[in-house]
Image (spheres, rainbow, N blue to C red):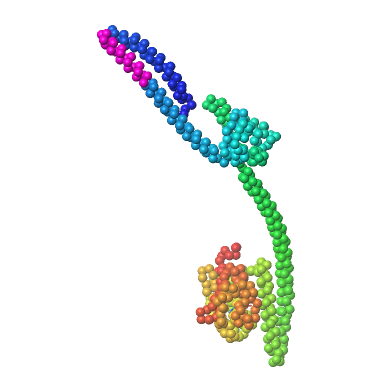
């Protein structure tokens, strides 16, 4: 309903005054204009008929329509009141069923009406709450007047308060935490008719919040404790790591020192035996194999010391490569020469070819790789058997393969033989002297030179070891 629309009473009042005035005016106008005109221009009979018609019809018709209009207004009012009553009943039912306490206050703050929620939230039953000052329900007794005045003033100024948390005292004296929603109520003229207060019990929520806070603080403590413990562990680990590093360094220095110290006497023994063999004109037959044993054992020891030194260098990152553009053929030939000097019973088949591009590698290291592979070929194939060497090249790499005539490598060992200290448990490997470092060093050296190494069994027998080295390109030396 628009605020400036007239009320039904005002309309009827208006009609009550306007109708007689309108009828009087109409009668006067009729007498002054129409009656006079008919009288002057027509006969007396016509005048008489017009007069009867005017008074008999106009008056009743106007009165009829006036009453009809009044009836319409009353009907509309009744319908509007009916609608208002229904929505009020609905609102009252909702309010009554609400679990929140809904309280109506007089302008002075006294409790006038309330719903069943008051019993749930504040424990008041029956009429005991009627007329109490709302301020007397507030939990903080010392401050309740100040608090109520603040609520009332704020609500008057801004129309409402929402989400204000405080405490109220239940009828049994216990305190309950509540969330207050307050509204100022005014009549149509704007005069204060009181306040509506909604109290929501937030005790449970508060308890949960407190529990969550406690849990949070407990978790924080725990996290802090664990972080401290972790920090301590990290520090311990860092210290242990530092100690290990030092230990490792000492070990590596020790290994390097001992290995170098062993190499010198070995070289001397080897030299002495060779001199003895050369100088003695006749070597007693029983001593020939003994000298051979000394020679072989010295060589083994020398190989072991070299492998240990290489491994040490690789693992401490001290492996230094003297890479340069070199031809692979002379290196292979030199290596074959060396192995044949040591193992005269070997048969090495190598058809030297020309036309291979230079590789970018450290020739001493390539010699070491080849020595290891030739030694293995000799160790894992029958004496006098053949070892074949092949070389091929692609646009970017040169491949060298060494194929022996042994039993080959057990398939399950192929993926592991390049691991440090890995030795196959096949009978051949168990008999052959070794310590599982040779292929490990080969792989480290090949990879350090930018190549690859792998092993496979040849379809017609024997193991094949292949390694690749990159072909020298102009820009290698800068990189
Ligand atoms: P070592 O020969 O000292 O045991 P290696 O690292 O040179 O150590 O070789 C690792 C293992 O690979 C050997 O124990 C052996 O089982 C296998 N192996 C190496 N070369 C051959 C080969 N030519 N034929 C068969 N098995 C081989």
Residue at point 73% right, 80% down?
Answer: 268
Where residue 239 appears, x then y in whole percent? 72, 61
Left or right relative to 385: residue 175: right
User: Visible in this render: residue 268?
Assistant: yes
Q: Nearer the viewer, residue 193 or 129?
A: 129
Q: Nearer the viewer, residue 234 or 197?
A: 197
Where residue 82 appears, x then y in whole percent? 45, 32
Left or right relative to 448: residue 29: left
**Split into 4 quadrants, where in the image is the C terminus?**
bottom right
Left or right relative to 41: residue 155: right
* As drawn, 225 above or below 459: above
User: Visible in this render: residue 167?
Assistant: no
Residue 352, located in which quarter of the rendered image?
bottom right
* As drawn, 479 above or below 97: below
In this view, which residue lies farthest toward the front?
126
The stretch drawn in magenta includes residue 86: no
* As drawn, 186 above or below 248: above
Residue at point 71% right, 65% down?
Answer: 244
Where residue 148 appears, x then y in whole percent? 64, 32
Residue at point 64% right, 48% down?
Answer: 212
Prevailing secondary structure of the magenta residues: helix
- Quadrant where ligand 1 appears: bottom right
The stretch drawn in magenta includes residue 58: yes
Q: Nearer the viewer, residue 75 or 40?
A: 75
Residue at point 46% right, 24% down?
Answer: 7
In this view, which residue lies farthest toward the top?
40
Q: Nearer the viewer, residue 360 or 344?
A: 344
Where residue 4 appears, x then y in whole percent? 48, 25
Residue 263, located in which quarter of the rendered image?
bottom right
Magenta-colored span: 43-64
């Amino acid at each position: 309903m628009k605020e400036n629309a007239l009320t039904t009473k005002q309309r009827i009042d208006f009609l009550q005054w306007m109708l007689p005035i309108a009828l009087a005016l109409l009668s006067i106008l009729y007498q002054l204009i129409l009656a006079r005109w008919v009288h002057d221009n027509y006969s007396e009979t016509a005048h008489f008929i017009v007069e009867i018609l005017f008074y008999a019809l106009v008056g009743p018709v106007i009165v009829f329509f006036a009453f009809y209009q009044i009836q319409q207004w009353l009907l509309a009012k009744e319908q509007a009141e009916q609608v208002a009553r229904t929505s009020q009943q609905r609102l009252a039912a909702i309010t009554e069923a609400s679990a929140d306490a809904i309280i109506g206050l007089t302008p002075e703050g006294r409790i006038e009406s309330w719903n069943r929620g008051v019993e749930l939230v504040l424990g008041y039953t029956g009429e005991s709450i009627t007329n109490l000052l709302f301020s007397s329900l507030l939990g903080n007794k010392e401050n309740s007047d100040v608090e109520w005045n603040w609520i009332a003033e704020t609500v008057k100024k801004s129309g409402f308060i929402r989400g204000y948390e405080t405490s109220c005292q239940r009828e049994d004296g216990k305190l309950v935490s509540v969330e207050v929603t307050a509204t100022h109520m005014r009549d149509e003229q704007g005069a204060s008719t009181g306040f509506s207060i909604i109290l929501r019990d937030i005790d449970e929520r508060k308890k949960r919040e407190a529990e969550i806070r406690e849990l949070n603080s407990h978790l924080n403590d725990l996290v802090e404790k664990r972080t401290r413990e972790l920090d301590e562990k990290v520090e311990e680990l860092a210290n242990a790591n530092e100690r290990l590093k030092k230990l490792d360094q000492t070990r590596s220095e020790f290994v390097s020192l001992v290995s170098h110290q062993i190499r010198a006497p070995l070289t001397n023994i080897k030299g002495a035996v060779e001199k003895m063999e050369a100088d003695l004109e006749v070597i007693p037959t029983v001593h020939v194999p003994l000298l051979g044993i000394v020679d072989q054992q010295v060589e083994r020891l020398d190989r072991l010391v070299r492998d240990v030194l290489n491994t040490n260098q690789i693992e401490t990152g001290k492996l230094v490569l003297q890479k340069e553009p070199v031809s692979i053929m002379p290196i292979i030939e030199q290596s074959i020469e060396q192995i044949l000097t040591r193992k005269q019973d070997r048969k090495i088949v190598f058809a030297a070819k020309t036309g291979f591009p230079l590789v970018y590698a450290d020739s001493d290291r390539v010699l070491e790789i080849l020595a290891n592979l030739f030694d293995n070929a000799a160790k894992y194939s029958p004496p006098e058997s053949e070892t074949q060497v092949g070389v091929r090249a692609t646009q970017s790499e040169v491949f060298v393969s060494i194929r022996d005539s042994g039993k080959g490598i057990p398939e399950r060992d192929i993926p592991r033989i390049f691991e440090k200290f890995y030795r196959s448990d096949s009978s051949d490997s168990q008999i052959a002297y070794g310590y599982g470092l040779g292929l490990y060093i080969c792989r480290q050296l090949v990879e350090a030179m930018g190549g690859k190494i792998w092993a496979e069994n040849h379809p017609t027998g024997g193991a094949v070891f292949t390694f690749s080295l990159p072909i020298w390109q102009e820009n290698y030396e800068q990189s």
